[in-house]
Image (cartoon, grey):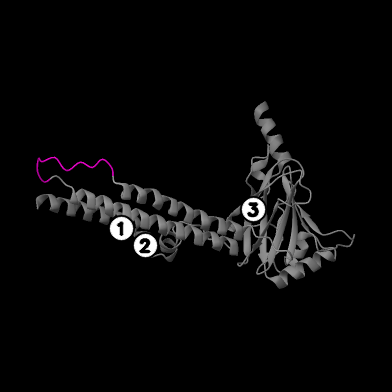
């Protein structure tokens, strides 16, 4: 009894300590949703990220069920086969039915996880024959160019946005439309990554038709999202940022119309009531930084 009382007190103290450490967040819906609804999965803004979230949740529940079953079997074994006397228990060399079960069950579990993983992967990487919008993404050391392939500016060429060392390029895209990205690299391997998409794709040079460097998303939430290069591509890789500006379909059409009339990215964004410059990341003056570094080295 005394031992049981001590264990109960220790358990109560542990629970009280845990509640004390997390008490400031227990009442917050965000904490509850992140840890017990999404199980730590980040919140995405695309249909594809929702499919990946469902795979994550399903895998987590499957792992919990298997874990509980294993813990229950361990507890049952400890209790059922605890030492009752000094008599040697009956020895069993092998148990063929049990060994068959131990072989088949892991195979079924792995096959199930593989099946749902492949299905989700195919859904995320699905490319439609006739997407609503097509945007070409050209990566180069060390910035981005976004080309709206179905447009024509005053010079007859598709309108585009090119980043510089002093200007973050803004990729404007519509919500509630299927947007296909054709990625290409002018030099080395880069990687197109928007964290809120929960997806990234390497931009591999030497594939001009973009057959292997293509993906498609449907964004459901308007907003500004930072984009980055996720592949170590050279000296200024860390500063190869861009911004995705997701706007309503009406604003997107108005933006393209403004660009086709001759307005630049800044003016066209201002025209539809959006900030003309990036808000999620800041530009880096590479020339200034290099000069300051040389001055520091020289004393």
Residue at x 29%, y 46% (from the top left corner): 95
The Cα–Cα distance between marks 3 and 2, rounded to whole angstroms, is 32 Å
Residue pointed to by mark 3: 227
User: Which badge, 1 or 2, is on the more N-terminal residue?
Assistant: 1
Q: Confirm or deny contact between disc 3 and disc 2 (CB under 8 A).
A: no
Which segment is the magenta one? 84-94
Give the image location of residue 168, x and y in percent: 70, 52
In the image as oriented, which residue stretches furthest toward the front?
Answer: 96
> Residue 35: horizontal and vertical position, in percent?
42, 59
Q: Which residue is mark 2?
A: 26
Q: Secondary structure at mark 2?
A: helix
Residue where numbered disc 1 is placed = 19
Measured as percent of width and height from the top left, residue 182 is found at 73, 55
Looking at the image, the residue that sits furthest to the top is: 298
Horizontal relation, residue 174 to residue 51: left or right: right
Cα–Cα span, label 1 and label 3: 37 Å
**Count of labels shown?**
3
| Magenta run includes residue 88 | yes
Q: Pointer 2: residues within 10 angstroms few (<14), some, or many (20+)?
A: few
Q: Nearer the viewer, residue 134 or 289?
A: 134
Report helix, strand or loop for mark 1: helix
Quick check: marks 1 and 2 in contact, CB under 8 Å? yes
Residue 135, image x, y percentages: 74, 59
């Amino acid at each position: 009894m005394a031992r049981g009382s001590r264990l109960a007190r220790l358990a109560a103290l542990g629970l009280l300590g845990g509640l004390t450490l997390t008490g400031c967040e227990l009442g917050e819906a965000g904490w509850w949703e992140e840890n017990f609804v999404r199980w730590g999965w980040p919140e995405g803004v695309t249909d594809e990220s929702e499919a990946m979230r469902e795979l994550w949740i399903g895998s987590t529940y499957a792992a919990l069920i298997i874990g509980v079953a294993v813990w229950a079997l361990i507890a049952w074994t400890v209790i059922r086969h605890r030492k009752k006397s000094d008599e040697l228990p009956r020895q069993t060399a092998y148990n063929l039915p049990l060994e068959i079960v131990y072989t088949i069950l892991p195979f079924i579990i792995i096959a199930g996880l593989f099946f749902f993983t492949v299905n989700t992967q195919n859904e995320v990487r699905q490319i439609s024959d006739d997407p609503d919008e097509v945007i070409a993404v050209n990566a180069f050391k060390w910035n981005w160019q976004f080309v709206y392939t179905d447009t024509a500016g005053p010079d007859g060429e598709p309108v585009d946005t090119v980043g510089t060392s002093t200007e973050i390029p803004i990729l404007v895209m519509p919500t509630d439309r299927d947007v296909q990205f054709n990625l290409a690299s002018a030099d080395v391997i880069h990687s197109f990554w928007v964290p809120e998409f929960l997806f990234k794709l390497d931009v591999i040079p030497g594939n001009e038709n973009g057959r292997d460097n293509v993906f498609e998303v449907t964004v459901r939430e308007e907003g500004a999202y930072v984009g980055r290069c996720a592949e170590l591509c050279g000296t200024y890789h860390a500063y190869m940022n861009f911004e995705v500006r997701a706007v309503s379909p009406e604003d997107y059409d108005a933006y393209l119309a403004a660009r086709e009339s001759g307005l630049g990215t800044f003016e066209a964004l201002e025209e539809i009531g959006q900030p003309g410059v990036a808000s999620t990341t800041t530009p880096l003056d590479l020339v200034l930084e290099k000069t300051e570094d040389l001055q520091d080295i020289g004393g």
